[in-house]
Structure formats: C-alpha cells, structure tokens
Image: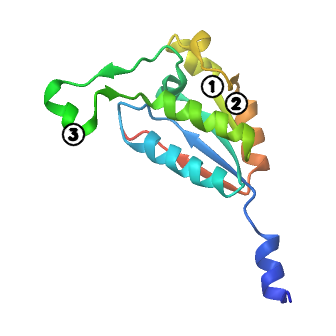
Amino acid sequence: MLTEETEEISAHRVRKVTLILSTGSYLREAPTTVLRLVEKLLERGIEVNVWAFEEAVTLTNRDQIEHSEPPSLRKVIGDKHAYIGKFIDQLLRAGLHTSKLNWVTCILCAQERGVEHHQMNGVMIGTLGDLWKFVQSADQVIAIPAYR
C-alpha cells in the first residue's frame, strides 16, 4: 500500500542526470570518478547526458592507444595501460542496451584542440544549445570543474 509520503518520493525520482565535465584525463582523477558515477546511474536505469568541454573533449579522442607499462610496474598494474576512452566506449555501448547515455562534445573546444574529427563512435559534436537542452531536461545537474 502506497502512502502519501511514498507517492511523493516516487514522484520526485531522478530519471535524468546531466553531467558537465571540463577536465581531461591526465589533469585530474575527476573524469574517472565521473565515469564510475555514469556507470552506476546507467545500472539504475537513469538516463545520463554528458556535456564535455575544455580539456574533457580529448577524453573521447578515438586515436588514443594503449601502451605498455614499464617492467617495474607490470606486476602491480598489469602489462597494458588502458586509456580512459576505452571506458567511455564501454559505457556508450552499455547505454545502448540499458539506459541511455548521450555524450556531447563542444564543437569549439574540439576544434581548438584538433580533435573534432577524431571523436569515437556514439559521441556527438554539439553547441551550447545542446548543453542548454541537457540542463533544462535534467532532474539533476552536476558540474565537475577544472581546478586551476
């Protein structure tokens, strides 16, 4: 039996989250933390929109490659160093089968960094208009700033 309190809580259930990300993978650990959050949100059936700008546009550069770790670290962390784009690619693919993940990269930021034509499959190039749509439609908005 539903009470008024239970109905009120379910009426305010988060269904869509927008994440605004501006930091690149080699500057801070924030992108890795954001991706873990995205993964958990998708697992819970929540739609996720990511707006990447500034250095975050390099996260989805499809031309990133794995590289071998130095021999002294191989026993600790393994032979290959996976790049963050691999994790994003897995999340984008998972979003096709569970909840929806939209990842939009700012066109101006991508052009400035030379990665506009190097975005991985599933990533859209967009404008501030897309960011505005994400913010308007979201139940929750989380901004992850670049610390300077």
Nearer to us of marks 1 and 3 is: 3
Mark 2–mark 3 Cα distance, whole angstroms, equals 42 Å
Tag count: 3
Q: Earlier in the sequence, mark 1 or mark 2?
A: 1
Binning the other alpha carbons within 10 Å of mark 2 as few (below 14), some (14 to 19) or many (20 upward) gives some
Q: Does residue 67 appear left or right of residue 61 in this picture?
A: left
Amino acid type, residue under disc 1 in the picture: Cys
Element at badge 1?
A: strand
Q: Nearer the viewer, residue 97 or 58?
A: 97
Q: Position of residue 23 (x, y in %)?
A: 45, 35
Of labels 1 and 2, the one closer to you: 1
In the rendered structure, which amino acid carries the disc numbered 3? Val
Dot 1 and dot 2 residues touching (CB under 8 Å): yes
Question: In terms of sequence position, does the residue under pointer 2 or pointer 3 come before the other?
Answer: 3
Classify residue 119 as left or right of residue 7: left
Are there few (<14), some (14-19), or many (20+) residues within 10 Å of tag 1? many
Say which mark, if any, is on residue 128.
2
Image height check: is 4 above or below 113? Answer: below
Q: Are marks 1 and 3 in contact (CB under 8 Å)?
A: no
Q: In front: mark 2 or mark 3? A: 3
Question: Is disc 3 placed on a helix, strand or loop?
Answer: helix
Which residue carries the number 3 mark? 76
Give above or below for 101 relative to 4.
above
Residue designated by label 1: 106
Residue in front for this viewpoint, 79 or 101: 79
The residues tagged by marks 1 and 2 sit, at their Cα atoms, a distance apart of: 7 Å
In the rendered structure, which disc, 1 or 3, sits on the residue that comes first in sequence? 3
- In the structure shown, which secondary structural element does the residue marked by tag 2 occupy? helix
Q: Position of residue 82 (x, y in %)?
A: 39, 29
